[in-house]
Amino acid sequence: MSFSNSTTILSAPKIETRTFTLPTALLIRLGICLLCTAWCLYNNIEMQNQITELQIEIPEMAKEIRLIQEENQRLQLEVIRFESPQQLLYQAGKSEFANLRQPLAKDVLTLQRP
Amino acid sequence: MTPSSKELKRLLIVALFTFFLFALLILQFYKIQILECDKWVHIAKKQHQQLIKEKAKRGLFYSNTSVKEGHKEEAQAFLCDIPTFHLYADPLSIPTEKRDGVSRLLNQVLQLKGEEFLKLRAQLDKISRSRRLTLFLDQEQQKAIQKLWLPFAKKEKIASNALFFIQDFKRSYPFGKLLGPLLHTVREEKDPKTGEVVPTGGLEMLFNNYLTGKDGKRLILRSPRHPLDAGELISSPENGADVYLSINHYLQAIAEEEIEKAVVQAEAKGGWAVMMEPNSGEILALAQYPFFDPSDYRKFFNDPKLQEQTKIKAVTDPYEPGSIMKPITIAVTMQANAELKQSGKKEIFSPSEKLETRNTHFPGRSKPLKDLYSHNYMNLPLAMQKSSNIYMARMVQRVVEAKGAEWYRHALQTIFGFGIKTGVEIPSESGGLLPTPGKKHPSGALEWSAPTPYSLAIGHNILATSMQMLRAYAIIANGGFDVQPTVVRSIIKTKSDGSRETLFTHQPQEPKRLLDPQISRELIRVMKYVTKPGGTAWRADVPGYTEAGKTGTSEKIIGGTYSKKDHISTFIGFTPAENPRFVLIVVIDEPATKYIPGVGKNHMGGFCAAPAFARIAERSLHYLGVEPNDPHGYPKGDPRHNPKQADWFEETQELLKLHKAWNG
């Protein structure tokens, strides 16, 4: 199969091409938006990380506080035992403290806070 | 190549079938995720989460640290709650073959033997996620178990929280036995039904509703990595309210130390001493010996003989007060006198009146009434100083003749509260017994007969508690005003935000006059002779201070009859005599009945109870910072001793002369 020379070749329709060029201002705006979004996203992730870190630290700190509280209670108990009235009466009965006297109420001066 | 219609048909069937299967799967998802969501969430939570109680702290009892004027000290608790641990296991997390190893490991710390160890081992075989292995481990034991357990669990690949601790609180008594019978304690085992603590008695029982807090809730996850102490707090625990007592810990220690010495010295069965502020009715000390140690409560409750020590005998055990009733008799007589005078009638008595007091018969009595030492004549100060039975009986005889027996009984009840509970906040208080005309004893005998008033006059035929006597004397000491004994100042709840809510405050009642101030003054005047030379209780003289009081010795009623060898000896008084800081009663129960040559009868109140009164009063007044108001009233040997300048010297000398003149 062949085409003769006399055959008229139809010319292809002319396609009109348009090139869209974004204005610089819009590009800048988009860039800023993207930057802001990225910044917010970064901050959010950073905050989440900090929260996670704190969440990990809380049990450790709670344990530490509990241990300090327990130690504090133990020491308080020791102090109460040491200052028990029986212990004070026993100490007061010793010869080295024989010179000590309970102050009279009239000798106790109470200063009022201004 | 185009597929044949047969092939297309087969493909369609496969596709439809696959679609159908997917549809079924989606339906199943819908059923599980949407329709049965709650059910599966519940099951999942049950498998992975556990709700544990966050224990609330029980309220505490605090000492009265404001007894010293202008010198308030910091709040001081009588006891504290120390953390303790209950050991639990999650048996399903422990492989069967490793349970023996776990139990042996625990026993390195717990040191259980025989059956106890087998019980613990059996708990690990239970099909459960939470089994209690042992209770009340202290911190050291808890740490020791953890130290052994964690490496063991890691090595044996067992979830580390297959063993876990639940924290609780345990009553601890840093002051030991101090105030034990009043405070009591709580049992180690909780109520199996409610899980609540069970008080053994005393104030722990009376104020249980206030002291009990509300447990919080904490959600914990079951996972090898999840620490048990860091679960989510669902609700915070609400601690119980604290009870602020009127009792001061230092005064209490003084009273306990001295009552112990007095009981031991008197070779007695026991004894108690109660101190009360006469105006407010606040009990400042409430000591009792033998002691009850609340931290060892099982020992006392398992032995019937020791159970006696767990009750406050000053309110639960009424007894015949004996001669300490005599000032009450005089008060009632003076009251009758005042009423007669007011109505224009002839008075029945004068304190200076010379009255014959030889042993004599009184109507209705089969035997003559006797005094310990016979005296021919007496007036009121002499009768009080020598504790004359006959003088008191004569007084009551006149009262009954002038006003009637009913009036006399009514006066004893309405003015001094005999036969009625004082209402002090101590469980099992007895109201005592004031005979009622027409009423019968369980034996069938009439409570009130013709000689009853004469017996009442000298403290017989009446049963009164030490608290009732203390209140009666407080009325005399405070100038004749009513007073309500109390051991509680306030109940305060501290909330989780630190704010304080007052749930109860002891409000002083409106002053209600029960006795004329003149009667009060006259009674104080005559009671001052008792502790001076010639008196029955010179051993109760408080060095450096004035005092007024009365001794009493009564025979105990054992098996319905008076025992000649079992006595109750008492001294009750107040100091300083004017504007007293406290009223104090010292009771010695069953002192050894013996005569000490050159000293006297050991079982008499003036011998065994009076010295304890003097010692407790002196030390307490020093602690309170009360200035001595009798600067020369010190015993021989003290550089301040100067009897001629001491308080009540001249009056006592005059009374001695009078006694000599009337009785030879």
Image: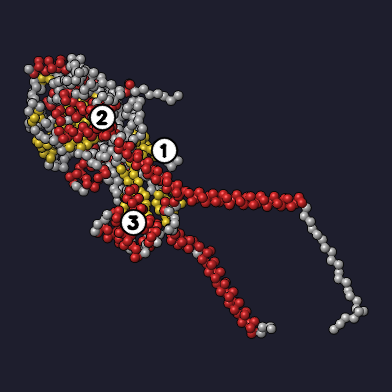
Callouts 3 and 2 in the same chain? no
In the image, residue B461 above or below residue B548: below
Q: Residues within 10 Å of mark 2 (few under 14, many from 20)?
A: some
Total numbered circles: 3
Inter-mark Cα distance, 2 to 1: 38 Å
Say left or right for A39 vs B563. Answer: right
Type of the residue with mark 2: Ala
Q: Secondary structure at mark 2?
A: helix
Chain of residue at mark 2: A
Residue marked by disc 2 = A92
Q: Residues within 10 Å of mark 1 (few under 14, many from 20)?
A: few
Residue marked by disc 3 = B132
Kindly indicate the quadrant of the structure image that contains residue B364. top left
Inter-mark Cα distance, 1 to 3: 36 Å
Look at the image and tell me whether residue B195 can be seen. Answer: no
Residue marked by disc 1 = B501
Type of the residue with mark 3: Arg
Q: Nearer the viewer, residue B385 or B240?
A: B240
Q: Which callout, 1 or 3, points at the residue further toward the start of the chain?
A: 3
Inter-mark Cα distance, 3 to 2: 48 Å
Say left or right for B264 vs B486. Answer: left
Say left or right for B552 vs B51. Answer: left
Look at the image and tell me whether residue B175 can be seen. Answer: yes
Q: Residue at x 40, y 57 (%)?
A: B160
Type of the residue with mark 1: Glu
Q: Residue at x 23, y 22 (%)?
A: B545
The spot of residue B227 in percent (x, y) is 43, 53
The label nearer to you, 3 versus 2, is 2
Of the numbered discs in the image, which one, if any, rests on residue B7? Answer: none
